[in-house]
Image (cartoon, rainbow, N blue to C red):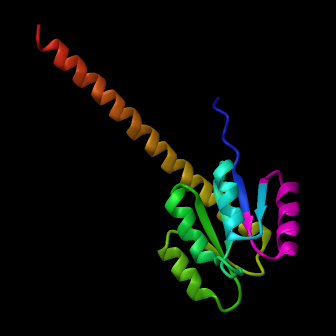
Amino acid sequence: MEQMEQMKLMLVDDEERFLSTTQKLLSRKGYDVLTASSGAEALDILRTHNVHVVILDVKMPGMDGIETLKAIKRTYPLVEVIMLTGHGTIDSAVEGLKSGATDYLTKPTDVQDLIEKAEEAFSKRQVMEDKIRVAHSRAIGKSAREILRETGGKE
């Protein structure tokens, strides 16, 4: 049987306490979790790690969540992003969804909710990856058939 790929998560938030607490809780449940305390740091990590799902805080100093989301989607369109919105930032949740976020969570967030939404986003991504694989193999298959047809038809 094929080994199911394990979901790799990244939490992006400028609140260190939220990062360490949530990372501990998720790791205890067997999840592979990376953390970043800024948008720039998150983009750096994405360059070197195959992250599947990003939990991204909307309100961060410097590069905010929406800017970070747009940058992630531009460079890594397959990365699923879940926006983390605090009190009174529901408008940014809407903006995030328009800019390519999969879903959003409100703070304070329940770890179980976070896990459910992350798992949902991860399976969505796997479906997408499967579709891409199928499309690729069809494209390769088609060209091989065309080549055969071309060479076969000239006899």
Q: Is residue 34 left or right of residue 59?
A: right
Is there any visible trace of residue 154 in the rendered image? yes
Q: Position of residue 147 (x, y in %)?
A: 24, 21
Is 126 placed above or below 80 here?
above
Q: What is the quadrant of residue 139 in the picture?
A: top left
Q: Position of residue 65 (x, y in %)?
A: 63, 76
Q: Which residues are magenta?
A: 11-32
Is there any visible trace of residue 101 in the rendered image? no
What residue is at 65 percent from the left and 29 percent from the top? 1
Q: Is residue 118 left or right of residue 21?
A: left
Q: Nearer the viewer, residue 48 or 91?
A: 48
Q: What is the quadrant of residue 143 in the picture?
A: top left
Q: Nearer the viewer, residue 105 or 67?
A: 67
Q: Nearer the viewer, residue 47 or 22?
A: 47
- On whether residue 13 falls in the magenta region, the answer is yes
Q: Nearer the viewer, residue 116 or 126?
A: 126
- On whether residue 136 falls in the magenta region, the answer is no
Q: Position of residue 31 (x, y in %)?
A: 79, 53
What residue is at 66 percent from the left and 53 percent from the top? 51
Spot the residue most to the top.
Answer: 155
**Quadrant, the C terminus:** top left
Is 3 placed above or below 14 here?
above
What residue is at 69 percent from the left and 50 percent from the top? 7
Spot the residue most to the left.
Answer: 154
